[in-house]
Image (cartoon, rainbow, N blue to C red):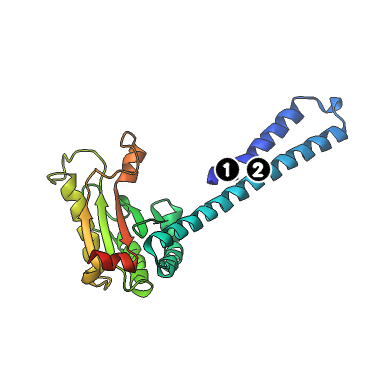
């Protein structure tokens, strides 16, 4: 959506320059320029409306997702909605850099972090910047959804382990999930009774592994806040 915000005006200015500069000033009248400006303004209005319609469509889709979840779980998701709003604010830097994502799903509220936020390549030790992000998450977990179970999932790309000493991506993804779990418990005060961890290796990709950006998206840690009712059913 950012590209759509910058390009329309630049494109219209380019069109104006081409139409205005392609003909000598002596060959055009002031009315011609006024007509061209009017036409370009109308195009800008159309593009703005398209952008507004797209935003409205995304908001409507989010509302439909919430209603669908409410229908399936038979519960109001007010706690999760509040948590989502709080996390949107507290993680605005990570979200703005496209290194984190919030998504309401059938499983609950999923917080996805690119692995680079927490870990150096091939490592399972949470770095200082990653710790700050996890503290923000933990504050919401403890204040807004104190009764929800929390699942931590580790994922890798499809590149085989070569130099880092792990037997396979299974071990690396599991170790990273556990590292996040232990930090939430030991340093952030999240009750261990609420926490679980799983490693999925390379087998749940969200993007094709045939590009470097796809692999980057697949190397991730997901923290899932389960709706209270679903958490009770799992016990």
Do the CB atoms of the residues marked 1 and 2 lie less than 8 Å apart?
A: yes
Of the residues under marks 1 and 2, which one precedes in the sequence? 1
Find disc 1 in the rendering and name its residue: 4
Q: Residue at x 37, y 70 (%)?
A: 140
Find disc 2 in the rendering and name its residue: 47
Q: Residue at x 25, y 61 (%)?
A: 180
Judge whether 65 appears above or below 147 on screen. above
Judge whether 80 appears above or below 218 on screen. below
Q: Secondary structure at mark 2?
A: helix
Q: State the image coordinates of residue 41 (x, y, percent, origin top left).
A: 74, 42
Judge whether 113 appears above or below 25 on screen. below
Number of other residues with Cα within 10 Å of mark 1, as a class: few under 14, some 14 to 19, many 20 or more: few
The CA distance from mark 1 to mark 2 is 9 Å
Q: Nearer the viewer, residue 106 or 54?
A: 106
Q: Residue at x 28, y 71 (%)?
A: 188
Q: Nearer the viewer, residue 67 or 26?
A: 67
């Amino acid at each position: 959506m950012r590209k759509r915000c910058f390009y329309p005006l630049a494109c219209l200015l380019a069109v104006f320059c081409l139409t205005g500069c392609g003909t000598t000033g002596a060959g055009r009248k002031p009315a011609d320029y006024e007509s061209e400006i009017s036409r370009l303004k109308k195009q800008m209005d159309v593009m703005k409306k398209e952008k507004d319609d797209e935003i409205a469509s995304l908001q409507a889709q989010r509302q439909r997702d919430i209603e669908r979840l409410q229908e399936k779980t038979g519960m109001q998701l007010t706690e999760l909605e509040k948590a989502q709003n709080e996390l949107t604010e507290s993680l605005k830097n990570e979200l703005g850099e496209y290194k984190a994502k919030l998504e309401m799903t059938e499983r609950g509220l999923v917080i996805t972090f690119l692995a680079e936020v927490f870990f150096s390549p091939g490592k399972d030790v949470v770095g200082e910047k990653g710790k700050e992000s996890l503290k923000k998450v933990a504050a919401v977990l403890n204040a807004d959804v104190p009764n929800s179970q929390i699942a931590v999932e580790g994922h890798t790309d499809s590149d085989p382990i070569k130099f880092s000493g792990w037997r396979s991506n299974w071990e690396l993804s599991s170790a990273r999930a556990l590292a996040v779990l232990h930090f939430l418990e030991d340093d952030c005060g999240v009750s261990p009774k609420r926490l679980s961890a799983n490693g999925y290796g390379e087998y749940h990709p969200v993007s094709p592994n045939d590009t470097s950006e796809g692999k980057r998206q697949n190397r991730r840690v997901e923290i899932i806040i389960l709706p209270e009712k679903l958490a009770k059913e799992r016990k």
